[in-house]
Amino acid sequence: MDKMSQGRKIEVDVIIPTYKPGERFLCLLRRLKQQTFPVNRIIVINTEEKYWDSSKYKEIDNLEVYHVTKKEFDHGATRNLGAERSQAQVMIFMTDDAVPKGRKLVERLLEALLWKGPKGEQVAVAYARQLPCEDCWPVERHTRRFNYPEVSGIKTLADLPKKGIKTYFASNVCCAYRRDVFKKQGGFVGRTIFNEDMLYAAGVIQAGYGIAYVADARVIHSHNLTAMQQFHRNFDLAVSQADHPEVFAGLVSEGEGIRLVKETAKALIHQGKAGELPSLILGSACKYAGYRLGKGYQALPLAFVRWCSMSPQYWRSL
């Protein structure tokens, strides 16, 4: 018996940061109620109490809500607040727009935490497959297939030479964490503009644990981002990497980006959607420009950095 159970029934809490939650969030909560493995508590850390309408969620009897201000919000610290309120052996972090697909999401993630790596590595993190929404644009639809394939797997330190930065990929759009390891590793980075999930994943890989990708644990989640939104997002992604050279130094991510563009272009042509190629090219150019500027953000004027970022409030205290 895995020591995670400690001789008793495993408890699972779901922790969700929210900001102006909409109908997808209510759908998420209802789908969590339908899971084959019951969720103990749903812990919500909501940004700005004025945007929270408690009357919408009266049917969710295991919901706990805590409020922070927009000024207090941080990608890592806010999630840590949720973790501090949990005593469950497993914590599943989700975003407020990731809707479970099917009733076995929690069950499949729990099963994956019991997997072992090729050298017996304990799995500390298990993340779900993200499926595109019905209105997902063709380019983003293929990006989902590229990042979230149909085959599950475990990544360990041995994969770093071959997979590079992808070894550390573990999206907390929907991701299960062993609480004992989470506490041992110190949780998420307390202040970060973005990428807190990858920073944590890098820590557990370096500590000798494994990361499981669970293809049959599925959520519906995608965004139709404009070219400029992609620019801002990749700028912040690169800032997070520049701020943590101890994790990302020597790991090149441009190669994966080029492979994604090539495969997407081939798929669009094969599907008779060559008209989407200009959108792919523009979006890819903006992603690359944002990434390159973000990597060297320390040399840029602060006003320009704020303009480039999708989180201008992050820079106000600097």
Image (spheres, rainbow, N blue to C red):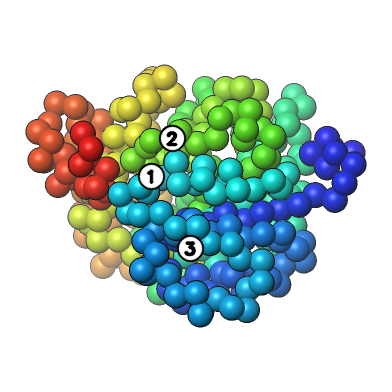
Q: Is 90 situated left or right of 73 in this image?
A: right
Instruction: Give me the residue at 47% from left, 28% from top.
Output: 164
Where residue 103 sits, quadrant-wise, is bottom right
Mark 1 crowdedness (10 Å alpha carbons): few <14, some 14-19, many ≥20: many
Instruction: Please give the residue where the numbered disc 1 appears in the rendered image.
Output: 74
Query: Where's the N terminus, which quadrant?
Result: top right
Figure check: 73 above or below 132: above
Secondary element at tag 3: loop
Residue named by callout 3: 96
Q: Residues within 10 Å of mark 3 (few under 14, many from 20)?
A: many
- Give the Cα separation between the discs numbered 1 and 2: 8 Å
Tell me which numbered mark, 3 or 1, is placed earlier along the sequence. Answer: 1
Image coordinates of residue 271 in percent, x first then y, are 41, 67
The amino acid type found where label 2 is placed reads: Gly
**Which residue is at the front of the view, 38 or 268?**
38
Residue 317, how many percent across, how many down?
Answer: 23, 38
Residue neighbourhood size for the residue with mark 2, other residues' Cα within 10 Å, grouped as few (<14), some (14–19), many (≥20): some
User: The C terminus appears in which quarter of the rendering?
Assistant: top left
The three-letter amino acid code for the residue at tag 3 is Asp
Disc number lying in front (3 or 2): 2
- Is residue 291 shown left or right of residue 80? left
Task: Give the residue type at disc 1.
Answer: Asp
In the rendered structure, the answer to whether residue 264 lies left or right of residue 160 reads: left
Q: Residue at x 45, y 33 (%)?
A: 189
Q: CA distance from mark 3 to mark 1?
A: 16 Å
Which residue is located at x 72 percent, y 67 percent?
35
Can the viewer see residue 143?
A: yes
Q: Which mark is residue 99?
A: none
* Res 292 visible: no
Q: Nearer the viewer, residue 238 or 81?
A: 81
Asked if the residues shown at circle 1 and circle 2 are in contact, with their CB atoms under 8 angstroms apart, the answer is yes
The residue that disc 2 covers is 190
